[in-house]
Image (cartoon, rainbow, N blue to C red):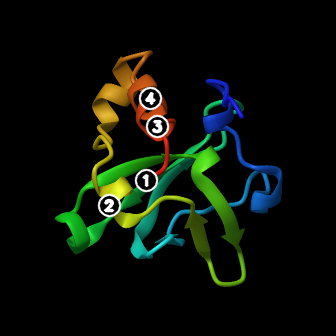
Amino acid sequence: MVVSEIDIWVYHPAAGHQQGTDLIGYKVEATDGSIGKVSKHSDEVGASYLVVDTGVWIFGKHVLLPAGTIKLIDTTEETVYVDRTKDQIKDAPEFDAAKHADEPTYLDQFAQYYKQPHM
C-alpha cells in the first residue's frame, strides 16, 4: 500500500478522533511503553499532529507525531496510543515551534521521517 503525502497528517477513521477534543495533557503510549504527554495539538485539515513533551525520558525533548501515527485516542483514560516504538519516536526530528511558525515546508521533514518503513 502506498501512503500519500497527506495520509500521514490525517487521523485514521478507527482512531476515535473527534474534532475539537482537547488532547493537551493526555498521556502518550508507544507500542512499547509510555513516552510523555501531549503539550500541543493541531486539528488542521490535512496537517493534524500532536506535539509530545517527553519529559525526563529523553531530557525534555518535544517530538511531533503526525495524526496518521495515532492508533487510538482513549478519552476515558485520557491516553493516545501511537503505532511507533519509543526508539522510533526518540530518533524523530525535534519539534521547533519557531521554525514551525516561520518555515512553510517545516512539516516535510516529519512526513519523510514517519513515512519510512516501520522497524
Instruction: Locate residue 49, reporting x and y percent.
Output: 56, 44
Q: Residue at x 38, y 27 (%)?
A: 109
The answer to whether the residues at label 3 and label 4 have Cβ atoms under 8 Å apart is: yes
Q: Residues within 10 Å of mark 2 (few under 14, many from 20)?
A: few
In the picture shown, does residue 108 fall above or below 9?
Answer: above
Mark closer to the chain start, 2 or 4 = 2
Looking at the rendered structure, the kind of residue marked 3 is: Gln
Secondary structure of the residue carrying tag 3 is loop
The answer to whether the residues at label 2 and label 4 have Cβ atoms under 8 Å apart is: no
Q: CA distance from mark 4 to mark 1?
A: 15 Å
Q: Residues within 10 Å of mark 1 (few under 14, many from 20)?
A: few
The answer to whether the residues at label 2 and label 1 have Cβ atoms under 8 Å apart is: yes
Q: Residue at x 50, y 70 (%)?
A: 31
Q: Residues within 10 Å of mark 4 (few under 14, many from 20)?
A: few
Secondary structure of the residue carrying tag 1 is loop
Q: Which residue is mark 1?
A: 119
Q: Which residue is mark 3?
A: 116
Mark closer to the chain start, 2 or 3 = 2
Q: CA distance from mark 2 to mark 4?
A: 17 Å
The numbered disc on residue 112 is 4
Q: Which residue is mark 2?
A: 87
Q: In the rendered view, does 46 fall on the left or right side of 49?
A: right
Q: CA distance from mark 2 to mark 1?
A: 10 Å
Q: Residue at x 44, y 29 (%)?
A: 112
In the picture shown, does residue 7 fall above or below 92?
Answer: above
Q: Residue at x 37, y 55 (%)?
A: 89
